[in-house]
């Protein structure tokens, strides 16, 4: 996880989102994405849809999450 977060930071990504265990990922700084105004593609994901902000994050980054096109077709 640290390598992924470091790579995302180096690429100046604003945040990383994931669907994961609510007791495991907070140790890496993840919080429910809804706290940042980011909504999952499937509402049932709820608190399992989490986000961690990075240095390039701006509070104006909000809205519905969408997968990149190649992943959305799976």
Image (cartoon, rainbow, N blue to C red):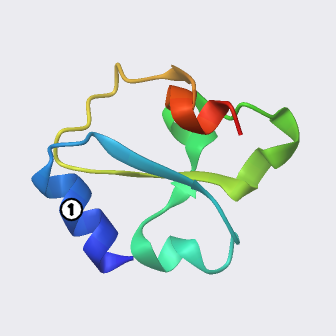
Q: Secondary structure at mark 1?
A: helix
**Quadrant of the snapshot with the N terminus:** bottom left
Horizontal placement of 42 versus 8: left or right? Answer: right
What residue is shown with label 1?
7
The x and y percentages for residue 58 are 26, 29
State the residue at coordinates (34%, 19%): 60
**Quadrant of the snapshot with the C terminus:** top right
Q: Residues within 10 Å of mark 1 (few under 14, many from 20)?
A: few
Horizontal placement of 23 versus 7: left or right? Answer: right
Quarter holding residue 10: bottom left
State the residue at coordinates (67%, 65%): 20
The x and y percentages for residue 30 are 49, 62
- The vertical placement of 65 against 52, above or below, is above
The x and y percentages for residue 59 are 34, 27
Which residue in the rendered view is the most extreme toward the right?
44
Quarter holding residue 2: bottom left
- The vertical placement of 30 against 11, above or below, is below
State the residue at coordinates (24%, 42%): 13
- The vertical placement of 6 against 46, above or below, is below
The x and y percentages for residue 45 are 80, 47
């Amino acid at each position: 996880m640290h390598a992924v977060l470091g790579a995302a930071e180096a690429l100046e990504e604003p945040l990383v989102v994931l669907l994961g265990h609510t007791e495991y990922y907070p140790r890496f700084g993840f919080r429910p994405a809804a706290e940042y105004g980011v909504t999952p593609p499937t509402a049932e994901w709820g608190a399992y849809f989490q986000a961690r902000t990075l240095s390039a994050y701006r509070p104006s980054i909000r809205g519905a999450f969408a997968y990149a096109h190649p992943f959305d077709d799976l």
